[in-house]
Image: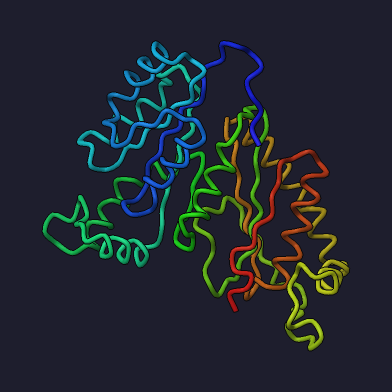
Amino acid sequence: MRNEPDQHDEPGELVVVTGMTGAGRSTAAKELEDLGFFVVDNLPPQLVPDVVRLVDDSRGRRQPVAVVVDVRSGSFFASLQEILAQDRTGRRTTLLFLEATDEVLVRRQEAARRPHPLQEGGRLLDGLRRERQVMAPLRGDADVVIDTSNLNVHQLTDKVAEAFGTENSTSLKATVVSFGFKYGIPVDADLVADMRFLPNPHWVPELRHLSGRDSAVASYVKERPEAEEFLQQYVGLIQTVVEGYLREGKRFMTIAVGCTGGKHRSVAMTEEIAARLRERGLDARPMHRDLGRE
């Protein structure tokens, strides 16, 4: 959770929402509005500083602002990157990037019965390919990336609320997410760890139906000497990365921990990694992407 600013005149946060068409920008914007942000949708990037000045004059500098910009803006790429790089708004700025797989985006666009803005009379996939090329630099610079491929509306709003619900500019928020390699690596992962070097509880009959959240499975996984050695070294590595992220002004980290199916080893180790990070004073939250999928 974010703490309120200590200084009375500290300006509120500016969140720039962007990402792929159909990935959930409107849903994210609505949730930010519910969280108290002044939200402007479909804004040309050149007007972002002007909107911030208008909000400063009419609502005060502490009013948080969110703007939604997308590829339909003519000078989208150059203008937005320039604004973010030069800090022309005078506010702490967070770039939120929403994305999803092509398969999901195609399904959503077809359900909405709307052409892609870069389709140019061709296939929908051609428009998505062009959009990914334009968006690639912003995707790399994003402070927060949310992959909405497997999220419903409520899950997406929960993620936005978790990231922007309160102010805390001095600490880093880490999400430790378990996953199954057979379902694919999370695209928003900053770090990826592979737990398939550990014995698989799936082959133990009395453990197969349980998950890594059950104490029997957790003990089976964590009591291995190699598991403890990994935990000690990996948590120390994460701490080093966290310190570097904070020096570079990054406040969000996603740590993906995988095993074959995302049910046993990765779940147990995700819970343990998050717990050890919290012991070190880090805001760490475990999530389990594929638990219950089998």
Q: Residue at x 86, y 70 (%)?
A: 219
The image quadrant where one finds the C terminus is bottom right
As displayed, is residue 26 above or below residue 129?
Answer: above
Q: In which quarter of the image is the N terminus?
A: top right
Residue 126 placement, left or right of 199: left
State the residue lying farthest toward the bottom.
205
Number of numbered discs on residues: 0
Horizontal relation, residue 253 to residue 37: left or right: right
* Left/right of residue 80 with respect to residue 153 in the rendered view: left
Q: How are the residues colored?
A: rainbow
Q: Where is residue 168 in the image (x, y as percent from the top left)?
A: 64, 29
Q: Quadrant of residue 68?
A: top left
Q: Residue at x 52, y 22 (%)?
A: 12
Residue farthest along the left direction in this orientation: 121
Percent of width and height locating residue 200: 74, 79
Q: Position of residue 154 (x, y in %)?
A: 50, 54
Indicate the position of residue 121 as horizontal and vertical percent values: 11, 58
Judging depth in this view, the residue of 24 and 195 nearest the camera is 24
Q: In the rendered image of this protein, does residue 188 appear above or below residue 252?
A: below
Name which residue lies at 64% across and 70% down.
291
Indicate whether 148 appears above or below 72: below
Of the pair 239 and 110, the residue shown nearer to us: 110
Q: Residue at x 58, y 74 (%)?
A: 293
Left or right of 129 on screen, residue 38: right
Q: Quadrant of residue 45?
A: top left
The correct choice, above or below, for 1 with respect to 133 in the image is: above
